[in-house]
Image: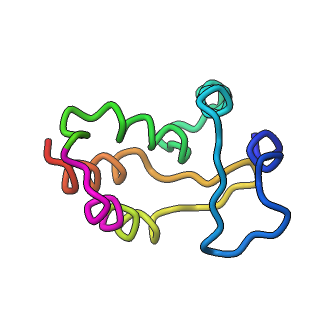
Amino acid sequence: MQGTLLQLAPPTLDSDSRWQVSAEVFQKLFEMADRLDLDGYITPVQAWNRIRDHENFSRLTRERLKTLENAMRPNIKCQGFAAIMEEAIFEILLNKALGP
């Protein structure tokens, strides 16, 4: 999974680096993450799909997204294959940011 995404990364990365990922690659990452047996955890691509599918997604502002990011940050664990987060904690934080 990391290899797929990192192929699109700039040659050097710092904390402010950004790069474009096509919808096709994003979908492939989502499908790959869906095959992992994470039992109560989700990956970043799964989290983004839940954010995007939330009924109040249209109310997501840059400020709310930054608040959600800051709330999630201490709850993210790095595994060898991907970053993960407890699904229940993610849902609580998402509902705080966008409402139930």
Residue at (52% x, 36% y) in the render: 39
- x and y percentages locating residue 31 in the rendered image: 62, 24
- x and y percentages locating residue 14 in the rendered image: 70, 75
Closer to the camera, 43 or 59? 59
Closer to the camera, 72 or 22? 22
Secondary structure predominantly adopted by residues drawn in magenta: helix
| Quadrant showing the C terminus | top left
| Quadrant showing the N terminus | top right
Question: In the displayed structure, does residue 95 sit left or right of residue 10?
Answer: left
Question: In the displayed structure, does residue 60 sit left or right of residue 79?
Answer: left
Residue at (82% x, 69% y) in the render: 12
- x and y percentages locating residue 68 in the rendered image: 33, 61
Question: Dividing the picture into quarters, in which one does residue 96 lie?
Answer: bottom left
Residue at (20% x, 32% y) in the render: 55
Image: magenta residue range: 59-67
Residue at (27% x, 35% y) in the render: 54
Closer to the camera, 18 or 57? 18
Looking at the image, residue 8 lies above or below residue 35 = below
